[in-house]
Image: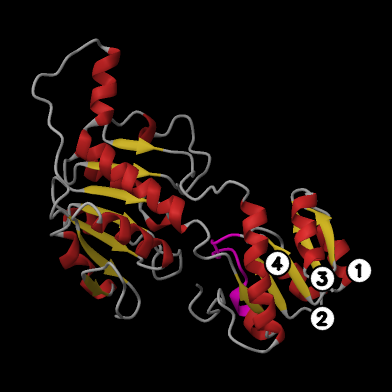
Amino acid sequence: MIVGIFSSTEESVISKFRERGLEVKTIIRSNDNCEEIKRLNPDVIICRNRDNIEQFVHDSPNLKFIFIVEVGLEKLPFNELIKHNIRIANTSGISADIMSNYVMACVLEHAAHLEEDFSNKQKHHWKRYQNTDSLLEKTLLIVGAGRTGQAIARKAKAFGMKTIGVVSHKRHIDFVDEVGTLEDLNNYLAVSNYIVCALPLTSVTLHLFNKDRFCRMRRDSVFINISRGALVKEGDLLDSVNKGLFAKAYLDVFETEPLPENHAFWTNPNIIVTPHQSGRLEKHLEKAVELFFPNYAAFQNGAKMPNEVNLEQGY
């Protein structure tokens, strides 16, 4: 049995299963889902990272596969999943295009000084000889050069930028001029004009960007975080920006969301705040379900799934 836990039972989503001859029991997401899951004892669950997956595992002896309809995985009970031999796939890459658009929008906004222009417009101030900076030969560092990182690199190359990618294991990546690992990060920070954080959140990457990292960045560099807020030690970032250790930060994710009204990020002129929008894809659930089918087919055949999660590594 396949059980899908959705925010709503949209016909456009359910029809996708019917078209493929699959029956799915749909449940509206609520705090009472655990009892219903226990009663149904499914083989496959389609849900979100934030659902009570640990309880589902304990209550569902038939459970063998969970499909997560989002990219983030940090709330999964990895040890329990390994113990019960349950395979996981997610929607990694589903928002790569729009997230790469967001990153390039930040890069272009900074290069064209559009925020300053907007501020001057409010003041009716005509700034003489305003510059638009060239991106040609500027260095873009992508820390976490997975599917989204590669999409960012492809678009950056169209502007003539040099691209550097940081991954767990060195390999060839299209559109990336140089590939390194986290061991190389400090050296890369010192030569990069734009730094994009696109890593998954794990015990290794928690607070990866801290005072020590910000101290190594160029004073004219720009930091962009589109992944998870806890990758950044927020107090260190604020202090570093205030001291001029780097020029500007574009933050789409935060340790506490929504960002508290009294948070210092709101009023800091060198920190741009956006409401976790970079990966918010139109018709997300419909597109996520489309990814379920090739992964489910691979699961049934005992093959590696296209979006299979490495439970040992946590991503």
Query: Is residue 293 placed above or below 135 in the rendered structure?
Result: below
Element type where label 3 sits in the image: loop
Please state if 129 lies on the left or on the right of 53 as rendered. Answer: left
C-alpha span from label 2 to label 4:
13 Å
Query: Which of disc 3 and disc 1 is earlier in sequence?
Result: 3
Query: Which of disc 4 and disc 1 is earlier in sequence?
Result: 1
Disc 2: which residue: 61
Amino acid type, label 1: Arg
Disc 1: which residue: 39
C-alpha span from label 1 to label 2:
11 Å
Mark 1 and 4 residues: CB-CB less than 8 Å, in contact? no
Element type where label 4 sits in the image: helix
Residue 94 image point, x, y percent: 53, 60
Amino acid type, label 2: Pro
Query: Which of disc 2 and disc 3 is earlier in sequence?
Result: 3
Residue 310 image point, x, y percent: 53, 79
Please state if 230 lies on the left or on the right of 36 as rendered. Answer: left
| Boundaries of the magenta span | 70-79
Report the quarter where the N terminus lies: bottom right
Amino acid type, label 4: Ile
Query: Which of disc 2 and disc 1 is earlier in sequence?
Result: 1
Please state if 275 lies on the left or on the right of 182 as rendered. Answer: right
Residue 143 image point, x, y percent: 31, 63
Residue, x 65% and y 63% (percent of image)?
Answer: 290
C-alpha span from label 1 to label 4:
15 Å
Element type where label 1 sits in the image: helix
Q: Is residue 295 visible?
A: yes
Front disc: 3 or 2: 3
Neighbour tally class for label 1: few under 14, some 14-19, many 20 plus, Cα within 10 Å: few
Disc 4: which residue: 53
Amino acid type, label 3: Leu
Residue, x 39% and y 66% (percent of image)?
Answer: 205
